[in-house]
């Protein structure tokens, strides 16, 4: 099966930097798979996510979409790519335009991709909001009128409104309280199952990774040090860095 997204020996060094942010990473994301990218802050997780989104170009190596090199200048390919790959960001408040009503925010991918006008987008927006558990009047309100968990649901509705194949999530629950975090994780799991979504998630929370992702890739200082089935990586880690990462998780005294 051809990976929907693939990194081959990818290295990224930002202009003026003395070292690589990501070095020699090869990673394949199979259709329908859920993959977690884990590691300490500065390990290169978000840079990998930006590569997979087509927002960052590698200094060397190749990013592929459906087996073909991702070429930002290829307008036809990028149109298909943008419809197929959507993202949910860490902070739901900063990722939502406070000046726009929710209806316009959720409809943005439909309009920017030329799939719908404002009128024809309305039923799809209503369906997306309903699917993430928000009431019908949500569409006419502004982001500041909602809680953090509700704002993240709005962000998820925006991401799924154009029926993408891949959802990339950058710490999607880290800004939420524990109870809300569980509910949003459950929602993501349901959406993945219902829509056969491919999910790639950056997370510091290994409990979220264990409950949501089938595979895990561990990054240390821009290098991929371990990857495999989540049960194996978190349950019986082989690399010393992975063991230290798991060992640093706080535990209640017994």
Image (cartoon, rainbow, N blue to C red):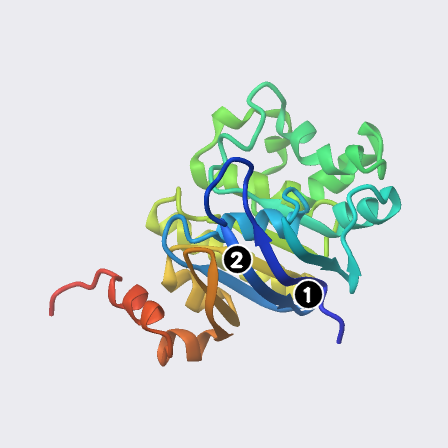
Q: Is residue 230 above or below residue 105?
A: below
Q: Residue at 30% across / 67% down in the picture?
A: 246
In the image, 120 versus 78, the foreground residue is 78
SS category of the residue bearing label 1: loop
Q: Residues within 10 Å of mark 1 (few under 14, many from 20)?
A: some
State the quadrant of the C terminus. bottom left
Residue 57 appears at what percent x and percent y?
Answer: 66, 45
Q: Residues within 10 Å of mark 2 (few under 14, many from 20)?
A: many
The residue under label 2 is 23
Give the numbered dot on residue 80.
none
In the image, 214 versus 185, the foreground residue is 214
In the image, 105 versus 128, the foreground residue is 105
Q: Is residue 81 above or below residue 145?
A: below
What whole-number distance in Å separates the C-alpha atoms at marks 1 and 2? 31 Å
Farthest-out residue, top: 99
Q: Nearer the viewer, mark 1 or mark 2?
A: 2
The residue under label 1 is 196
Q: Residue at 82% across / 41% down in the picture?
A: 73
Farthest-out residue, left: 254
Q: Residue at 54% across / 48% down in the picture?
A: 47
Q: Is residue 131 visible?
A: no
State the quadrant of the N terminus. bottom right
Badge 1 or badge 2: first in the primary sequence: 2
Residue 164 appears at what percent x and percent y?
Answer: 72, 52
SS category of the residue bearing label 2: strand
Farthest-out residue, right: 76
Q: Residue at 58% across / 25% down in the picture?
A: 97
Q: Is residue 139 above or below residue 172?
A: above
Q: Is residue 81 visible?
A: yes
Pointer 1 with pointer 2, Cβ within 8 A: no
Residue 216 appears at what percent x and percent y?
Answer: 49, 68
């Amino acid at each position: 099966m051809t990976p929907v997204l693939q990194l081959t020996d990818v290295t990224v060094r930002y202009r003026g930097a003395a070292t690589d942010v990501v070095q020699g990473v090869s990673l394949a994301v199979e259709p329908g798979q859920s993959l977690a990218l884990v590691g300490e802050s500065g390990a290169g997780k978000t840079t990998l996510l930006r590569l997979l989104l087509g927002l960052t170009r590698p200094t060397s190596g190749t990013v592929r979409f459906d087996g073909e090199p991702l070429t930002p200048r290829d307008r036809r390919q990028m149109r298909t790519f943008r419809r197929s790959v959507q993202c949910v960001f860490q902070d739901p408040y900063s990722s939502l335009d406070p000046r726009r009503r929710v209806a316009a925010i959720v409809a943005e991918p439909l309009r920017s991709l030329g799939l719908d006008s404002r009128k024809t987008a309305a039923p799809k927006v209503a369906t997306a909001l309903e699917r993430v558990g928000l009431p019908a009047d949500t569409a006419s309100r502004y982001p500041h009128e909602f809680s953090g968990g509700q704002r993240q649901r709005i962000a998820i509705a925006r991401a799924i409104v154009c029926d993408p194949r891949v959802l990339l999530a950058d710490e999607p629950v880290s800004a939420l309280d524990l109870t809300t975090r569980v509910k949003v994780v459950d929602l993501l799991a349901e959406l993945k199952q219902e829509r056969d979504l491919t999910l790639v998630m950056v997370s510091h929370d290994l409990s979220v990774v264990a409950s949501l992702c089938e595979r895990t890739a561990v990054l240390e200082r821009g290098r991929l040090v371990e990857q495999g089935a989540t049960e194996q990586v978190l349950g019986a880690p082989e690399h010393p860095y992975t063991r230290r990462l798991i060992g640093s998780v706080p535990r209640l005294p017994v």
